[in-house]
């Protein structure tokens, strides 16, 4: 079975942001996201894989038998956009998305250029919806604040 690439690495989060993120606005947004996601989850930021900053963890197992651990909420300050790994496709999340602001999305990710493009109270609600979904469907370290 294939090895998961996104595993906890133990690397230093601030050091990663300072060395990986070249754009000053994105660097500031990354530090702000660390602060707010830590506050919202009650979890310390931890590096997962080479470039994902995660909060909390949960264990998943698919019907195929593939299983692993993943952060409950996470983001990566990629070159083109900040990737937010915090979207669960629930009815409430679908109602909240149109109110979020300027973003694009894929099946499980939301992409933003900068934090000021989105509504943080809506992001908070999306995060809480994701935490509740994961808590209901997986064994996790989830704490809701």
Image (cartoon, helix red, strand yellow):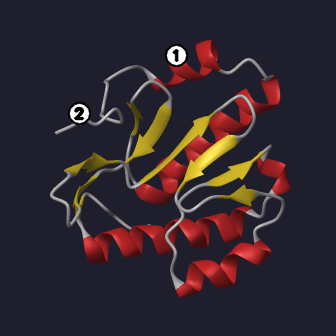
Give residue 23's position: percent from left, percent from top.
Answer: 79, 23
Q: Which mark is residue 3?
A: 2
Q: Which residue was labeled with disc 1? A: 15
Mark 2 burial class by Cα count in 10 Å: few <14, some 14-19, many 20+: few
| Identity of the residue drawn at 15% across and 58% down | 65
Give residue 56's position: percent from left, percent from top.
Answer: 34, 50
Q: Which of 10 and 80 is in front in this view?
A: 80
User: Residue 44, located in which quarter of the rendered image?
Assistant: top left
| Horizontal relation, residue 138 to residue 115: left or right | left
| Horizontal relation, residue 100 to residue 5: left or right | right
Q: Which mark is residue 92?
A: none
Residue 107 sits above or below residue 70 on the image: below
Residue 51 sits above or below residue 112 on the image: above
| Identity of the residue drawn at 31% across and 62% down | 142
Mark 1 burial class by Cα count in 10 Å: few <14, some 14-19, many 20+: few
Q: Nearer the viewer, residue 46 or 133?
A: 133
User: Residue 125, located in which quarter of the rendered image?
Assistant: bottom right
User: Residue 95, located in which quarter of the rendered image?
Assistant: bottom right
- Nearest-to-viewer mark from 1 and 2: 2
Q: Say whether disc 1 or disc 2 marks the residue closer to the N-terminus.
A: 2
Please state the total of marks drawn on the protein image. 2
| Horizontal relation, residue 138 to residue 77: left or right | left
Quadrant for the C terminus in the image: bottom left
**Label 2 SS:** loop
Quadrant for the N terminus in the image: top left
| Identity of the residue drawn at 63% across and 80% down | 94
Give residue 30's position: percent from left, percent from top.
Answer: 65, 35
């Amino acid at each position: 079975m294939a090895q998961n690439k996104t595993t906890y690495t133990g690397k230093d989060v601030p050091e990663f942001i300072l060395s990986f993120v070249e754009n000053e606005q994105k660097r500031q947004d990354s530090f702000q996201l660390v602060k707010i996601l830590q506050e919202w989850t009650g979890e310390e930021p931890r590096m997962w894989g080479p470039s994902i900053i995660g909060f909390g963890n949960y264990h998943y197992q698919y019907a195929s038998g593939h299983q692993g651990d993943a952060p409950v909420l996470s983001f990566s300050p990629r070159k083109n956009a900040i990737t937010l790994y915090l979207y669960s496709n629930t009815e409430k999340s679908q109602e909240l998305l149109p109110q979020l602001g300027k973003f694009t999305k894929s099946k499980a990710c939301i992409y933003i250029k900068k934090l000021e493009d989105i509504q943080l109270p809506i992001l908070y609600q999306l995060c809480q919806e994701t935490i509740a979904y994961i808590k209901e469907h997986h064994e996790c370290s989830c704490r809701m604040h």
